[in-house]
Image: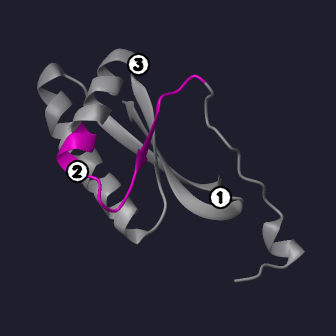
Amino acid sequence: MAFSESSKATARPKRADPAMEVLKVSATSKPVAVAGAIAGVVRTQSKVEVQAIGAGAINQAVKAIAISRGYVAPGGLDLVCIPSFIDISIDGEERTGIRLIVEVR
């Protein structure tokens, strides 16, 4: 799909925070495994960036975030998710994905 110059008027940042841990989720990722990774990072760093490209990957990422909320809730942590778009270069091709910042409320 081609975009006109006017549709690219808003630039998307490459990274929300350079020091933040990034977890990349694919359509074949197991939500329970990703949830464990999210919970582990959130417990030590209080926030994590989850990246997903495509409907299947986004589905797995959202399920993982929901599961991870259950993992950290007994410890008194309440997780929130802040979604945004991200442009990612894969094999020289620009792709649009979803960035999900998961942090403690």
**Residue 88, image x, y percentages:** 63, 54
Label 3 vs label 1: CA separation? 31 Å
Label 2 vs label 1: CA separation? 26 Å
**Residue 49, image x, y percentages:** 47, 38
Region in magenta:
19-35
Badge 3 element: helix
Q: Is residue 14 visible?
A: yes
Q: Which mark is residue 31?
A: 2
Give the residue type that dot 1 points to: Asp
Q: Nearer the viewer, residue 4 or 77?
A: 4
Q: In the rendered view, does 101 fall on the left or right side of 62?
A: right
Give the residue type that dot 2 points to: Pro
The 10 Å Cα crowd at callout 3, few under 14, some 14 to 19, many 20 or more, is some
Q: Residue furthest right?
A: 5
Q: Is residue 29 magenta?
A: yes
Of the image marks 3 and 1, the number of the one nearer the N terminus: 3
Label 2 vs label 3: CA separation? 20 Å
Residue designated by label 1: 91
Instruction: Work out whether 100 lies above or below 70.
Output: below
Badge 2 element: helix
Q: In the rendered view, does 92 fall on the left or right side of 78?
A: right
Please give the name of the residue rendered at 35% of the width and 68% of the height, measured from the top-left corner: 56
Circle 2/circle 1 CB separation < 8 Å: no
Residue designated by label 3: 45
Instruction: Work out whether 33 lies above or below 19.
Output: below
Viewport quadrant of the C terminus: top left
